[in-house]
Amino acid sequence: MNYQSTRDYAANPSTINIDAALNLGLAPDGGLYVPSVLPKLDLAQIDAAEGLPAVAAQALAPFFTGSSLAAALPEICAEAFDLAMPEIIVGDPAFGMSVLEQFHGPTAAFKDFAARFLAACMRRLRVGQALATVLVATSGDTGGAVASAFHRLPGFRVVILYPDGRVSARQAHQLCAFGDNILTYKVDGSFDDCQAMVKAAFSDAQLRAALPLLSANSISLGRLLPQMAYLVFAAIRHQQMVGTPMNLIIPSGNLGHGVGALLARAIGAPIGELVLAANANTVLSGYFETGKYQPHASLATLANAMDVGAPSNFERLQWLFPNGKPLGMQAQSVSDVEIQGEITDTFNRTGYVLCPHTACAARVLKRLRASGDARHYVLAGTAHPAKFETVVEPLIARRVEVPAGLAQLLRQTPQVNPLAANPAALKALLLQLGA
């Protein structure tokens, strides 16, 4: 399997294997790597009863054809996907709502799956090589998952950038709690600023010549492909349980989760309707309404991990659907007031506690019901509500129990440094670290 850039492929049709794509992260022309062809799953050969790691290995195998990691893929998947991911029916079964709980990993967010997969791959790819700097921008959850996956891993240093004051207090504490080979910087700006700084670093030839840089954002195939893989498993399990394809509502910011779902469906996973649930940042809902992609400065919301005004993975969406919007997919935006109302209403009706991001998905489902859509929907539960206790607890008038892994991190002393919101400041920092 070979991979190409999302940009200028017709003019420069070069391809590389996945090992090289994982090491590069971003293509030299600034584009994102995508597979040259899409394989097809033989669903008759896949049984969800084999478990998530085994199904993920089967789904990923064609994408690793020719890779030095191919033989180790079952082992990698066993390391990365050895986490619970239950589908929980919430409320009256007649209402047709399930939550796919993806937050049972060490940092209580869905990013744990892909971060662990990336770390397992890179640990094998870079045996005996020079110290690599894993560079990651985070809107709240990615940085913690990457830090956990690479913490104390020999041969790797992690540099995390997060927007100061625009993540929850517990997310910030978690990002800064690891120490050792994890360096965390609070940026005086937005997530879009952090993401632009990271992209500039990967596009800087001088910087890349000075020290090895690895991407841990969803621009990396090492993050995107595992998101596809666990949704393949979830969809096959859902169909085997209830007999119908999985209609999925995904809280969406940088669009990696959404593109992962599109890839899963494209290779044959039984996924029906796909709905992106955004917060008040309307770039995705605006695109699906008008057909025009209009990035904007991101707005701060209660669902802060989705505070993205220029989603990187939009390039992959355009690659998948170059002639227009994908069929069987839509996007809607949800306000902070609606987020608060949905957390309260869902808890009062069902006793189930939503995080602000999953609440966006629940509110979109309520709209679909009002429009006459009676199909069963699965909501992607992307983070544990305890990470957002200052939002959630006043709305439900009770304390949310903190998962053990998060509680342990909250007991650590945070370590963080400030960083200006410009690429030059990050370049200077990285060159100093590499000196």
Image (spheres, rainbow, N blue to C red):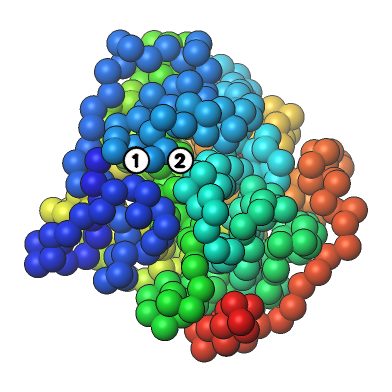
Q: Visible in this render: residue 397? A: no
Which residue lies under the disc numbered 1?
67
**Residue at 43% of width from left, 77% of height from top?**
209
Q: Taking 368 as reference, is 177 left or right?
A: right
- Front residue of 20 and 51: 20
The local crowd at label 2, few if under 14, some if 14 to 19, many if 20 or more residues have their Cα within 10 Å, is: many
Q: Visible in this render: residue 58? A: yes
Which residue lies under the disc numbered 2?
227
Q: Confirm or deny contact between disc 2 and disc 1 (CB under 8 A).
A: no
Q: Amino acid at mark 2?
A: Gln
- Front residue of 166 and 131: 131
What secondary structure is found at the residue carrying circle 1?
Answer: loop
**Residue at 76% of width from left, 72% of height from top?**
416
Select label 2 or label 1 by which is in front: 1
- Front residue of 362 and 148: 148
What secondary structure is found at the residue carrying circle 2?
Answer: helix
Q: Position of residue 196 (x, y in %)?
A: 46, 75
The disc at residue 105 is: none
Quadrant containing the N terminus in the rendered view: top left
Q: Position of residue 187 (x, y in %)?
A: 64, 78
Quadrant containing the C terminus in the rendered view: bottom right
**Residue at 55% of width from left, 63% of height from top?**
130
Q: Amino acid at mark 1?
A: Ser
The local crowd at label 1, few if under 14, some if 14 to 19, many if 20 or more residues have their Cα within 10 Å, is: some
Q: CA distance from mark 2 to mark 1?
A: 19 Å
**Residue at 35% of width from left, 54% of height from top?**
20
Residue at the extreme front: 128
Counting residues from the N terminus, which is met first, the one under dot 2 or under dot 1?
1
Q: Taking 183 as reference, is 389 left or right?
A: right
Q: Is residue 7 above or below residue 47?
A: below
Count the labels in the image: 2
Q: Quadrant of residue 134?
A: bottom right
